Every structure is written in C-alpha cells, then in structure tokens.
Amino acid sequence: MIGERIKRARTAAGLSMQALGDIVGISANMVKKYEHNQSMPSSGVLLKLAAALSVRSEYFFRPAQVTLGEVEYRKKASAPAKLLKKIESDVIDQAERWLALKNVWPNFPISDFDYHPDIPVVSSLAAVEHVAAKVRSDWQLGMNPLPDLIDLLESKGILVIVSNVPQADKFDGLEAKISGQPIIVVSAHWPGCRQRFTLAHELGHLILHGRLDDSVDEEMACNRFASAFLLPDIGLYQHLGEQRSNIDAKELYFLKHEYGLSMAACLYRSADLGVITQEKKRQIFIQFSQNGWRKQEPGKPYPQEQTLLFEQLVYRALAEGILSESKAAELLQISVMALHKQRQMLAEAV
C-alpha cells in the first residue's frame, strides 16, 4: 500500500526515482525498494518523502483505494503520457478523499447519478438540440443562463474534480467512473468558459452515449449538446435575432459573459442555428485569427468555476459529529490548527 502511494505521488510530482532520492537523501534503488514494498521507510524518511512530494504524511496510510474505470480523455494530440499520468494521480488522490468522506456517512446526502432520459435514437446534430432542451426541462432549469455548472452537476451525483496539474493547454478534459460514479475532470488553469464547455461536453457523453445513430459523430454531437445546453436557441435569438448579415465582436463578448460560453463557441452557435451563414462564420474567424483571439479572447475572461461541495460536506459531517477534527483536517489536507481557525472564521489559516 505505501509503495503504491509513494509511486503515485512521485508520478504526480513528475519526479524520477533518482530525483526523489536526491531530494530525500536516499538512493534511487532505495526508492525503488520502497515502491515495490521490498523495504519500509522509517518515520523520518516518510516525513521527508511527504515534504518532497507535497503530500501530508497521512496520505501514505489512507485506507481507501480507488481505480479509475472507463477513462475517456478529451486531449490534444500533443498531450504527453507523463502529463496524463500526473492528472490521473491527482484525480485518484482527490477521489480517494471523496470516497473516504462518503463512507463515513450512514446515508450520504448526495444521490448517485441516475438520469436516463426517454429519447429516440439521435439521428442528426439538429436533433441534439431537443436532447439539450429536454435535459433542461427535466431538471427544471428553464432557459436562462446557468450560473454555476459545477454545483448543478454535483447536485445530480456527478463528481467534478478540478485538477491543479499544470500544462493545462495540452489537456481537454477527462470523464471516467469510480465505483460506478461518473466523474468529470477539468483544469484549475482554464478560463471559466472553457471549464463550462468541457463540463457540458462531458455531460453530453454521459447522456448521448449509446443513443446516437451510427452516422452521427459522438464528439461533434457532444459539442453541439454543450453549446445548446449552455446557450439555448431562444437565448441566442433574443440577443442576436433570427437572421443577420454580420455580428459584431462586442456582441459575442456580451453573450460570453451572460451565458459562460466562449466568443468562438457563440459564433459557432450562431452559424449552427442559421443566424449567420457558414461563410460569414468563416470570415469572422479569419478576423479572430488575425487579432490573436483564437488563442486568447479579448477583454475580461469569464470567471472560473469552483467546487465547494466536498468542503461543505466535511464541515457538515463535523457539525453532525460524523467526523472527528483530525479526520476532517486530513481530508481537507490542512493542519488541525488551520481547521480550528477556519471553523471559527478567524484570519486566513496557514
């Protein structure tokens, strides 16, 4: 158990056995023995390993162990295997703490994801629009902008993990399952509109998988679902009208900040719904490229989304006597003293 955790934390830190050994003051061969459970590190070495790997010492003894299943990456071709291993290690660490928290509750207050809409086989991208509208209707969301997508998905039993692993530009999202529970992973380094599109895209996979005609590409269908779910047709028509000869970039900027969808995605949406022609979309994208907006859109970025549910449930479990302070601090990866300060709403804990 300890050996596997040392290896996972080393992989997440991007360190070779030699590099970790140099930091801790042991040989690479000794690190290998630890990882293969051929030798047990002393308490002093464990503390040094924890410091070198930026984990708490309790991490090495955490009983819960999970395995990612049905992993589906949405990644750029340049994403190296080393980066994906870092992401998976981070995801497993966060998921283990989720599972540990869930297991202490007699009745966990968040239901499992159990949404299976009664829809016919989706035979075209246009039909995806109806699926997105049905999800909004079934979940009683109306047609207005969705202010907090992470909170919405978590309330439906989808575990959302925000990974702080760097090199986010080479990673486009991950959807997997842990003990049957779907999880969606986004990066803490992305702008909010990219996080939201990825979350909606992965929700599309959960809902559309197995319901698409063979002629429909699933990735394209999930892109269409994400756009329709975040920006319903009625909202687009209300702001832009039903047919235009041109669209000003500032209009796309306003749409972005109202619906949390990038300017580029709003432009695609306009062409998909026939507000502008595909040729006009192409012309505007040429302007985007000339202005450098394909890499970074102008103006203030859309705010990032955050996940608060895990912390909220930890403090709820504390209040109800389900968790001890020491266990709560371990799950939150802070000291007991820092936990005291946070509970008392004092100055920022260190």
Image (tube, grey):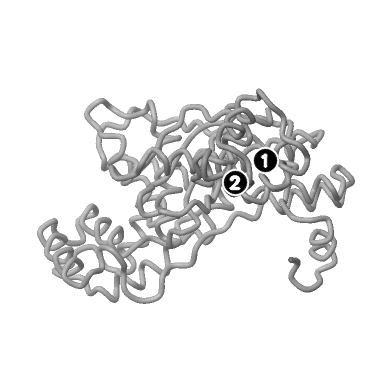
Residue drawn 31% across the image and 74% down it? 298
**Please, is residue 35 above or below residue 20 in the view?**
above
Q: Secondary structure at mark 2?
A: helix
The percent position of residue 126, horizontal first and vertical second, equals 26, 43
Quick one: label 2, few (<14), some, or many (20+) residues within 10 Å? many
Residue type at tag 2 = Glu
**Which numbered disc, 1 or 2, marks the residue that appears first in the sequence?**
1
In x, y percent, where is residue 159?
A: 58, 42
Task: Between residue 280 and residue 13, name the one nearer to us.
Answer: 13
Q: Is residue 237 above or below residue 329?
A: below
CA distance for labels 1 and 2: 12 Å
- Where, by quadrant of the figure, is residue 257 drawn? bottom left
Residue 235 falls in image quadrant:
bottom left
The residue nearer to you, when weighing 33 against 79, is: 33
- What is the secondary structure assignment of the residue under circle 1? helix
Residue 129 in view here:
no
Q: Which residue is mark 2?
A: 154
Residue beneath label 1, please?
98
The residue at the point 42 percent across, 45 percent down is: 173
Image height check: is 141 above or below 114? below
Residue drawn at (76%, 47%) of the image: 330
Choose mark 1 or mark 2, whichever is in front: 1
